[in-house]
Amino acid sequence: MVYVLSAMRKPLMPTENYARVRRLLKDGKAVVVRRTPFTIQFAGKGRTCIQPVTLGIDAGSKHVGLSATTAKNELLAAELRPRNDVTGLMSDRKERRGSRRSRTTRYRKPRFDNRVHSKHKGWLAPSVEVKIWNHIQAVRYVSKLLPVSKIIVEDAEFDLQRIKAMEDGKPLPKGEDYQQGEQLGHYNVRQYVLWRDGYTCQCCGSHGTDKKPVKLHTHHIESRRTGGDAPDNLVTLCEACHKAYHADEIELPVKERRRKSTRDMVFMGIMRKTLLLRLKEMFPNIEVQETHGYVTKYWREKLGLAKTHTTDAFVIAKNLDASRIGKELLIVPKREHNRQIHKCRINKGGTRKLNQTPKYVHSFQLFDRVLCKGEEGFIFGRRASGGFDIRKLDGTKINANISYKKLQLIEKRKPLLVAYI
């Protein structure tokens, strides 16, 4: 499939007439503007023919399905993998800021005194904002390739109280039960966890008395970065056991969190309405609709299709008689800026190593598309000595350390990395 743009960079209908594309390029009537997927642009005015194109979006926290279809053909199928590194980056930043406060450093004036005013109505956590933006980036990318006239998004809403009740074998919540959750009557999570564990250390069993009180802590089973502050990730420990555990002197009887993390479910509940509103604001000329998971499941099973993210997106687009496309794209957004200058670890002599090598090493930078031993790949790592780690977009290694002299630049890095699966 060759995607076509007009002389004004407006998307037209793609073509599979490769002979005609070669003639247009040879005669100078068109130029190549994108390699993957292959896209050409007309050099002058010409006849245009546009059909209604529907973009189906299977929204998700870790995998997003995209499918653009007409009544007869699927024109594009892609899987988007949103960024999931923001939570870790925010935690790193918090640790570094805390360490700076305890060091004797030069005085720096505050940039502003209070950040709470930035949390206006509708404020979302950065980890949620970046995933919503990745969804919008993918829609913008597709709309620049195809004349999309309608967008259909599948929203997902999870009843977490009902799910927890089913896992615990308790009666399903009804009516006012939703206002009486497990933390009812407790003013914070810590106090609830202490009450749940009977104000008793879950390691040594001490709970203290009036004459000999014991200081109790709430310990994260998984690190706060990965597991969060959910009650099922917290356990009660006395001060002595808590210190001994972090000193690797004892092992805890509780090694796994009580319940699987619901972070992805919570994200879907938060982002579903926000994504629809922002799509309507950013694409006023395109009709935006929503659908539900049970509708997608019904038609997918009726058609006998295997469950994948792109298949769900194809069903969501509702052009069920269209012929499927052969190749699928993988779209991966990458971090564009890294402001950390030095690594946290202090070397011998009190020096700290620079966090990264220069941006360009022998004219190559991270995530450039290169040709390596006859295969197209991306630069995932580079060394000042001139060695590069080349991988495919899905992480498959091509060569872990190859000289820059054996690489050929195909395309400079972009905010969205795109490759065929």
Image (cartoon, rainbow, N blue to C red):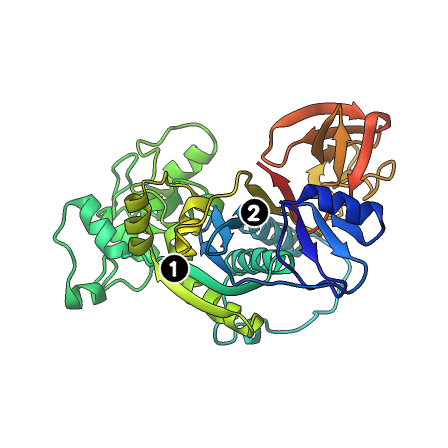
Image quadrant containing the C terminus: top right
Left or right of residue 238, residue 271 in this image: right
Q: Nearer the viewer, residue 262 or 302?
A: 302
- Give the label on residue 17, or none: none
For residue 366, above or below residue 274: above
Residue 236: x and y in percent read: 32, 44
Looking at the figure, which quarter contains the N terminus?
top right
Residue 318 appears in the figure:
yes
Task: Categorize mark 1 by other alpha carbons within 10 Å: few (<14), some (14-19), many (20+).
Answer: many
Give me the disc on residue 85.
Answer: 2
Tag 1: amino acid:
Asp
- Determine the CA span between mark 2 and mark 1: 23 Å
Q: Is residue 251 above or below residue 50?
A: above
Is residue 234 in view? no
Q: How many marks?
A: 2
In this rendering, position of residue 302 left or right of residue 281: left
**Residue at left 23%, top 63%?**
184
Residue 185, how many percent across, how many down? Answer: 23, 64
Q: Is residue 57 left or right of residue 234?
A: right
Left or right for 373, reference 147: right
Q: Residue at x 64, y 26 (%)?
A: 397
* Residue 105 vs residue 127, the one in the foreground: 127
Q: To which residue does mark 1 refer?
A: 155
Residue 143 in picture, x, y percent from top left: 60, 60
Closest to the observer, 205 or 259 = 259
Q: Residues within 10 Å of mark 2 (few under 14, many from 20)?
A: few
Residues tagged 2 and 1 counted as in contact (Cβ below 8 A): no
Q: Tag 1 or tag 2, which sits nearer the N-term?
A: 2
Identity, as a three-letter code, of the amino acid under mark 2: Asp
